[in-house]
Image (cartoon, rainbow, N blue to C red):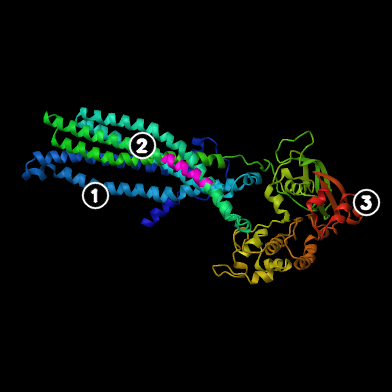
Amino acid sequence: MLARFFRWLETRQDPFPEEKPTMPPSDFWPFIVHYAKPFWRLLLASSLLAAVVALFEVSLFAFLGSLVDWLSTTNRETFWQDHGLFLALMSGIVLVVLPILKFFYESVVHQGLLPNFAMRTRWQAHRYVLRQSMEYFQNDFAGRVSAKVMQTSVALREAVMKVAEVMVYVGVYFTGAVIVFAATDLRLTAPMLIWLAGYIVAMRYFVPRLGVISTAQADARSLMTGRIVDSYTNIATVKMFAHSDREDAYAKDSMNLFLGTAYRQMRLATMLTVALNALNAFLLFTVTGLAIYLWTIEAVTVGAIALSVGLVLRMQGMSHWIMWEVASLFENIGVVKDGIEGIAREVAVVDAPDAKPLAVSDGAIRYENICFNYGKMRDNATGGIIDNLSLTIRPGEKVGLVGPSGAGKSTLVNVLLRFYDLEDGRITLDGQDVSKVTQESLRSSIGMVTQDTSLLHRSVRENIVYGRPDADDASMIAAAKKAEAHDFIQGLEDLKGRKGYDAHVGERGVKLSGGQRQRIAIARVLLKNAPVLILDEATSALDSEVEAAIQDQLVNLMDGKTVIAIAHRLSTIAAMDRLVIMDNGAIVEQGSHRDLLDRGGLYAKLWARQSGGFLAPAEAAA
C-alpha cells in the first residue's frame, strides 16, 4: 500500500519526456516557469501542506499558554472533567493529525519533487545543449558546459521549492505568531513588529549582495571545473610536455578566483549572523520584559508569559534557519542566472521549418558559389576562408583535396556536413540543398574518418556499432576484420576485467594507440556503409605495414561511393579520379595525378618537394 502510494507520487511526472526540447526563455522568471510548469500541482500541494502545518504548530503555542493558565487556576479534582475533551482533541492533533500532515508533505517533497524535478530539468537542458552547433562547444570548456547543466538543474529546483514551501511556511508562521500575540495582548505585538521590520531591513541589505556574489561564484565554479577537466582530458599532452606545474598554476588561478568569491560570501554571512543575533536578543528581552510587566499590572496571565517566551524562543531558532534558507535561495538564484547564460542560447544551426529527410541515390555533390568565413568580419569585399568557390563532384567520383594548412580543405567538409551554415551560395547532394534537409539524415548519409580520432569512453563494441546501432555481432566483427582491428581487439582487457569487444577504451580512447583508434574508426565507417565517404588523413596514424594492409579494404570501402579524401601524404591520394588543389580558400588546379604533373604547376612542385611522401607546411608555402 505504502509502496504503491510512493510509486504513484514518483510517476506524476515523466522525468524523461520524449518531445524535443525547445529553447528556454533567457529572462529569469520565464526560465524558471519553463522548467517548473510541469510540477505546479505538486508544488501547490506542498505549499498548502506547509501552510497547514505552520498553522497547527503556532496553535500549539496558544494551547501551551492556555495549559499553563489551567494548571495554575483549575481545581485538580475537576481538571480532567473541565478540560479533558480539549486535551484529548489536542492530543489527537499532536499524535495523529500533525504526523499525517507531515507524512503527506514529506512524501510529496521527497517522492514527487526532489528526484524528478532536477532530473527532468537536467534531461531537457542536456538534450537542448547537445543540439547546439559545433561553434558553441568549440568556444567553451566541456567541463564548464556540463557543470552549468548539472548545477542549474539542482539550483532551479531548490529555488522554486524554497519559494513555494519555505517562504509560505514562514509567512504563515509569522502571521500566526503576530495574531496569537495580539489575541493575548495587543501591546505584545509591538516588539514583534519592530523585530520583523529590522529582520526585513537586514535581509534587504545582505541577501541581494549575497545573490550577486553567488552569481560570480557559480561562474567561477564552472570555470574552475572546466579548467580541471581540461587538464584531465588532455593528460597525455600534459605528461608529454612535463607541464604538471604549469597546469597547477592554471588550475590555481581559477581556484583563487573561486576562493575570493567564497571569502566575500562568508564575510557577508558573518555580518548577517551578528545582526540577526542582535535582533533576536532584542526580541527576547523586550517580549519577556513586556510580558512580565503586563502580568504585574494584571493585564495578562502566567500562561501568556509562557506562550510569549516559548514562541519567541522558537522564532529565534527559526530566524537562523530562515536566514540561511533565504541566503541559499539567492545563492541558487545566482547559479540559475549563470546557467541561463550557458543554456538559453539560440542554436546556430537549425533544421529549416519544412526540412525533409535527405534521399541519396547517386551521391552527386555540388558547391555553388559558396562563401564562408566562420562568422568573422572580412578584411575586404572578398577576404574570407572561402570566397565564391564552385566545385562539382560526380556520383561515385573519388576526389582528393590537396593544399597547405589553412587552404580551406577541412572547411569544405565542415560546410558539407553542415556543422556551420554558409554565408552565401549553396551546397547540394543529389540536387537537394543540404540546408533544406534534416541534419540527422544528412550526416547519416555521410561516413567520415578523421585524423584526430576520438572514441567514446565505452566498450569497443559500442564504438564500432555507433555507425549502425542495429548491427549484429557478425557484421561488427566483419567490419573490424576488414579494418585490421579484430586481432588487437581480442587482446584488450580493461581494469574491470572486461575483455575483447567488451573492454572500455577510456576517455577519447586514451587506452589505445593512435593507430588502434584509427582502425576502430575505420571499422565504424565500414559498418555504417554510407553512400558518401570523407577521409580526412584517414591513415595518418597507421604504420606503413598496417596502412598497406588496410588500403585494399579502403578501396573496397570506396567502391560505389562518392569520396572526398584529404591528405598531406600525396602518395595516399595520387590514385584518386581527380585531385583538387586548394590555396587561400580557392581552387587553383584540378585534374588527375598524371595530368597535374605534366602541367608543371603547384601540384607538380609540391610533389617534387615532398620528403617521404609528406607535404610539409613550410614547403607548401614556398
- The crowd level at tag 2 (other Cα within 10 Å; few <14, some 14-19, many 20+) is few
User: Residue 460 location in percent, x, y?
Assistant: 63, 64
For mark 3, what is the residue? 599
The answer to whether marks 2 and 1 mark residues whose Cβ atoms lie closer than 8 Å is no
Task: Say if the magenta span includes residue 257.
Answer: yes
Q: Tell me the element at label 1.
A: helix
Determine the CA span between mark 2 and mark 1. Answer: 40 Å
Nearer the viewer's eye, disc 2 or disc 1? 2
Q: Tell me the element at label 2.
A: helix
Depicted 196 relative to depicted 549: above or below = above
**Image position of 70 (left or right of 585):** left
Disc 1 marks a residue whose amino acid type is: Leu
Nearer the viewer's eye, disc 3 or disc 1? 3
Disc 2 marks a residue whose amino acid type is: Met
Depicted 278 relative to depicted 402: above or below = above
**Image position of 302 (left or right of 208):** left
**Image position of 507 (left or right of 276):** right
Disc 3 marks a residue whose amino acid type is: Arg
**Image position of 590 (left or right of 379):** right
Label the magenta part by its dominant secondary structure: helix
User: Residue 355 location in percent, x, y?
Assistant: 69, 44
User: Residue 526 location in percent, x, y?
Assistant: 73, 62
- In depth, the one of 536 and 303 nearer the eye is 536
For mark 2, what is the residue? 271
Q: Tell me the element at label 3.
A: helix
Task: Say if the magenta span includes residue 98.
Answer: no
- The crowd level at tag 1 (other Cα within 10 Å; few <14, some 14-19, many 20+) is few
Highlighted range, magenta: 253-265
Q: Residue at x 55, y 49 (%)?
A: 249
Determine the CA span between mark 2 and mark 3. Answer: 82 Å
